[in-house]
Amino acid sequence: MLVAGVMTLSACSSAVVKPDGSYAVRQKLTALQADPNLSNRAVLPVQQAEAAVLAAEQPTKDLALASYRVKLADKKVEIAKAVAQTSYLDEQYKTLGAQQADARLDSRTQEADSARYDAKLARQDATAAEAESELAKQQALELQQQIAELNAKETERGWVVTLGDVLFDTGRAELKEGSLNNLSKLSAFLNRYQD
């Protein structure tokens, strides 16, 4: 009985426990698996890290083997994390590239829209200028016609208008009927073209 008690005591004193460091490796793996940006990006490396952590958590009396398993599990977790981060950053890079291309396209679209708007304004200005020019031509023609009707001549002193058939009775201030037509044309012309 004494022998059985001693053996039980010695077995308890050398009880196998999880190796040192296995808890920390498990924590790192759990953190990786809980990260929503990384957890699904490196499925195979995470599975390999999980298997290595399970092996590192196995109790063993061989301290060198336990230390090796913990270090191996730690490296596998680090590799899985690096692969997941690389995949995440790759995706971010592609997204930023697409956003940059979209921004460049939007900028060019805005430039083109602005150029079209400027061209539209220029066409409107040109149309307005053309209409003004046509109106000025018509007014010039009308002016020439009226000058011709008044028998006006341009001289160094300005325009000279000779009024024919402006007749008065002797000693009277009233114009004869035929004169009123010429004077009303001259009056209308001077009212319209005051300069």
Image (tube, rainbow, N blue to C red):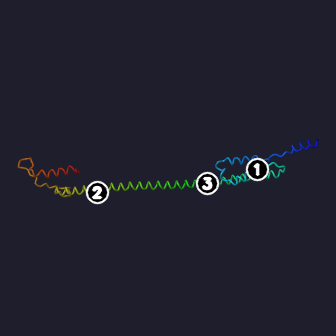
Q: CA distance from mark 1 to mark 2?
A: 94 Å
Q: Residues within 10 Å of mark 2 (few under 14, many from 20)?
A: few
Q: Earlier in the sequence, mark 1 or mark 3?
A: 1
Q: CA distance from mark 1 to mark 3?
A: 31 Å
Closer to viewer: mark 2 or mark 3:
3
Pick whichever, 66 or 168, lies toward us.
Answer: 66
> Which residue matches tag 1?
54
Q: Position of residue 88 (x, y in %)?
A: 63, 53
Kindly give the residue lying farthest to the left in the view shown. 170
Kindly give the residue lying farthest to the right in the view shown. 2
In screen coordinates, is 60 left or right of 4? left
Q: Residues within 10 Å of mark 1 (few under 14, many from 20)?
A: some
Q: Position of residue 17 (x, y in %)?
A: 82, 45
> Which residue matches tag 2?
134
> Which residue matches tag 3?
91
Q: Position of residue 57 (x, y in %)?
A: 78, 48
In screen coordinates, is 32 left or right of 62? left
Q: Residues within 10 Å of mark 3 (few under 14, many from 20)?
A: few
Q: CA distance from mark 2 to mark 3?
A: 63 Å
Closer to viewer: mark 1 or mark 2:
1
The kind of secondary structure element at disc 2 is helix
Q: Position of residue 155 (x, y in %)?
A: 19, 58
Dots 1 and 2: beta carbons under 8 Å? no
In screen coordinates, is 116 left or right of 67? left
Pick whichever, 40 or 145, lies toward us.
Answer: 40
Dots 2 and 3: beta carbons under 8 Å? no
Amino acid carrying label 2: it is Glu
Amino acid carrying label 3: it is Glu
Pick whichever, 64 or 177, lies toward us.
Answer: 64
